[in-house]
Image: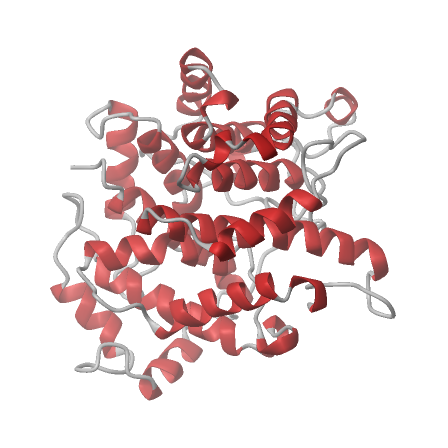
Amino acid sequence: MFRRLTAFLLTTSITGAVTGAAVVRAAARTSPPASGGTWSARAAAAYLDYRQSWWQAWSHSARDHGTVCVSCHTVLPYALARPELGAALHDTVETASERKLMADVERRVRGWAEMEPYYGGVGKSGGEEKAIESRGTESVLNALILAERDARANSVSADSRTAFANMWALQLQSGANAGAWSWLNFELEPWEAPPSTYFGAALAAIAVGSEPGGYAQSADIRHNVQQLVAYLRDNINAPFMDRVMRRDDPALFRRAMLLWASTRLPALASPAEQREMMRALYGAQRSDGGWSLSSLGKHWRRFDGTPLPTASGGYATGLIAYALEQAGIDASEPHLARALGWLAQNQDRATGMWPAASLNKARDPDSDPAKFMSDASTAFAVLALTNRSTP
């Protein structure tokens, strides 16, 4: 297991003093607990850095102009979580993977008009439809990554404002998804399937609300923000016919995303509405303190016919715990305390990750794609455990 991880670490210096697979093992032994738990921040950082480096070198993730696709499962969670880990570990220098990630985003934002879409295009698989989905998706991810960087620095960057301009230009103005963006659909839950348009719009709201300088209140985007808010509020539940036909219905997943987004863009939900979302999420919490991702949706099915994973997982538990923290819930609140306890106790200390399984099919656990869900699981576990509001 983890043959590629071992091979990579044997040839790459991660700490300068310790190299190879021993980095993860040494981190697990020596890293001090974070947030009062028993988990290893250093081991989590080693895992996430390895996975990001692997993704950046993988031929399937390469895009034009020497850039790499910003994936929802590996790259975006890394962009959100790795700076928080760096702060918790008192690292003073960004990793090479972080620098490459930000340089790619900046390059694609600055050269937006000349960049090929992640997928599709003239003469390519998926054609124009996939190109439109790709551009909408990328525009939101770029804006979010740059807005989060601006928020950490408490300064406004020209690149982030360019990214927002690119994003708003692609906001849908009519149809059932008016206010949202065309989103990649590969029939892969929970991020790249027909209902994932809502997920993308929630990320856009988080980006808008995170950008400093009062950006969300800017007069020139008032109409765009109003459309976005209306879409997210009006579509918290799946369309009636989708429910009648028992199509994929990520009911609680949407509530977790809306709760998180509403902490950045308050117009999305009143305090009473936030409490109602919390009650719904609390109702799905498992007896061990975690949440199962499969429990956050209805009628999800693996396309290979294998049973959905039902155990508690780092992604669902980390996402909900992080949203609760962002909403101001104290770490001593029983539901949140149990969730943080589950996260602290369920890191795989040998690898640094929080293992997770795909919603879409059973995968060979030794394969790199099998770790995509674990990448997101680890990053969101880290976000919850390193949240600055947590004692």
Q: Please tell me in which quadrant of the rendered image residue 93 appears.
A: bottom left
Quarter of the figure that contains the C terminus: top left
Quadrant in the picture for residue 286:
top left
Residue 29: percent from left, percent from top: 14, 65
Identify the residue shown where x is 50% and y is 48%. 144
Direction from residue 240 to residue 108 in the image, left or right: left
Measured from the top left, where is residue 61 in percent x and y?
A: 60, 71
Question: Going 60% across and 42% down the picture, which residue do you hit?
Answer: 200
Residue furthest to the bottom: 11
Quadrant holding the N terminus: bottom left
* Relative to 382, residue 224 above or below: above
**What residue is at 65 percent from the left and 20 percent from the top?**
234
Task: List the single residue furthest toward the top.
Answer: 272
Q: Is residue 285 above or below residue 47?
A: above
Residue at the far front in the pictured view: 219
List x then y, in percent, for residue 315: 43, 45
Please name the residue shown 63% across and 23% down the image.
230
Residue 116 makes an appearance in the image: no
Nearest the eye: 162 or 92: 162
Q: Is residue 318 left or right of residue 195?
A: left
Does the image show residue 206?
yes
| Residue 350 position in % (x across, y down) | 27, 66
Judged left or right of residue 207, residue 41 is left
Between residue 312 and residue 7, name the one nearer to us.
7
20 and 389: which one is in front?
389
